[in-house]
Structures are given as structure tokens and as C-alpha cells.
Amino acid sequence: MTITLSQQAFDELFQETVEPDQHPDPDDVLDVVYKYPRRLGQGYWRRIQLRPGLELIIGKLQMRDRMIILQPEQEHDWLEYHFHFSGEHHDQYRKVGGGEYSFVGSGLDPKQTSDCSDKNSFLEVNILMQPELLYSFAANQQGQLPQALQPWIRQSHQTYYCRCGTATPAMHTVAWQIFKCPYQGIAKRLYLEGKALELMGILIAQEIKIKDAHNHPHTLKPDVVERVYHARDILVKRLMQLFFITEINSELQLTSKIYLT
């Protein structure tokens, strides 16, 4: 069965059924668990405000049915890193499944359809960061971000930057440490903020590496080039030999036919 909802209807249903009064950490009022609407599935979203401009969301839920959400065009003013342990969803710009991640920058979130599969349970970690916080960490003295990160920040009329990829082992390790955080209170907040920033740091290193590879394609060493050409010559020679043998066989068959006639 497939359930189709507008974004507004989903939000209203969520607000009607959610119970935003559960605090898994009694020493942290900014750590809140929201139950998932029972008509849609079971599980929870856990939202932790780590500092102004930095939030962590952990999702663990099981969908009852496949769900399609019709999203209107809107402004996306957060940077969002989305890591999946399990579960799959996709739209026109991204597809994320188990062991994968997506990153979305700020800008225009176009009108689109989000499709959430009901085949697997969802287990995910999301990091939300305001662009101002990124600038405070990464901008130079002139207030500019590194060139590889500049596409992350776009105007409200420009479609947001988006990239999906397979999570590296380091990403998986840090995301799992976030999910299994053993602390409470201030120790928990410091631990999770450090891990959230570490995960963003791994992502930034990945982006810079990809950007550098695009701008400076890897050139083969002379000896490798020589071996490639040598392999090509051998292949061409063998193909010519095969062609020559085929031609001889054809001529022999034709001669035999003429002789027998």
C-alpha cells in the first residue's frame, strides 16, 4: 500500500500525534524524543540542539506503508548532512540507502516528490548546520570559504547544492559513535558536538578531494603509458591475425565450392 501526503498534511498529522515531552536525558531539556505518528509507522525522531546553528537528529523507525510526500518549493536555509545505516528514500535530486549519505547546501528546495520505502527499518543520523556557523569555522580573513565549499551556499532563488555518495569507513564509525553515545548531561553534549563536527570535517575533506581530482586529473606515469600502448599493439596484432585467418578460411571455402562445381 502507498500513502500520498502533501508536506503540509504530513506536518499536521505529525503535530497531532507526536508527544514532544520525552527527554531521554533528564539533565538536558534540549534533547527531546518525538514519537512517530502511529498511522504512518512506529519509532522516533530524537532532536538535540547542540549549540545555536548546530543540531543533531537521530531517527529510528519502521514505516507501515510506502509513503510519498509532495513537497512544495521552499527555501532550504540549513546545511544538512544525512547518513543512513538502513532504509531508503529518494526524490528528483538524491537517493540514499543503507551505507550511503547525502549532503544538501542552502538555497532553493524545488518542488518535488519524496518517496520513502517501507521495505526496511530506518536508522539514520542527520546533522543540521547554519551557514553562519560554517563560515565561523572555515572562512578566511576576507570572509570567504575555500573554493571547494563555496557551492554549498547559494541564494534563495538558486537550486541547492546536493551530492550523494557511499559512506567511507570513517563516516560510518563516527555516525555509529553518535548513535551509541554512552554519556549524559554536559559530557554527552560535548561528546556529540565533537562527533558532529568530526563528521562534517570528514565530509569537507571528501569534498575538497573530489574538487581537486576534478580540477587536476591524475596523469599516468610514462612507464604506465608505455605499457598501455604495448598492450594496445598486441591486441591490434592479434585482431589482425584473427582477421587474416578468417579471410583465408573464407577463400578456401569459396575455392572448394568452385572446385566441386
Image: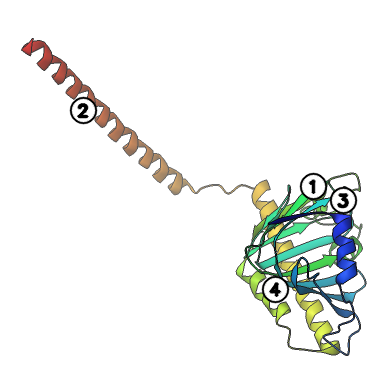
Q: Nearer the viewer, mark 4 or mark 1?
A: 1
The mark nearer the N terminus, 4 or 1, is: 1
Q: Amino acid at mark 4?
A: Ala
The mark nearer the N terminus, 4 or 2, is: 4
Front residue of this view, candidates 174 and 29 = 29
Please tell me whether mark 2 sits on a helix, a strand or a loop: helix
| Crowding at mark 2 (Cα within 10 Å: few <14, some 14-19, many 20+) | few
Q: Which mark is residue 112?
A: 1
Q: CA distance from mark 2 to mark 3?
A: 63 Å
| Crowding at mark 4 (Cα within 10 Å: few <14, some 14-19, many 20+) | many
Q: Which residue is mark 2?
A: 245
The mark nearer the N terminus, 3 or 1, is: 3
Q: Residue furthest left?
A: 260
Q: CA distance from mark 4 to mark 3?
A: 26 Å
Please tell me whether mark 1 sits on a helix, a strand or a loop: strand
Please tell me whether mark 4 sits on a helix, a strand or a loop: helix
Q: Amino acid at mark 1?
A: Gln
Q: Amino acid at mark 3?
A: Gly
Q: Which mark is residue 175?
A: 4
The mark nearer the N terminus, 4 or 3, is: 3
Q: Which mark is residue 107?
A: 3
Q: Are marks 4 and 3 in contact (CB under 8 Å)?
A: no
In the image, is residue 97 above or below residue 158?
A: below
Q: Are marks 3 and 1 in contact (CB under 8 Å)?
A: no
| Crowding at mark 1 (Cα within 10 Å: few <14, some 14-19, many 20+) | some
Please tell me whether mark 3 sits on a helix, a strand or a loop: strand
Q: Nearer the viewer, mark 3 or mark 1?
A: 1
Q: CA distance from mark 4 to mark 1?
A: 28 Å
Quadrant for the N terminus, please: bottom right
Q: CA distance from mark 4 to mark 2?
A: 61 Å
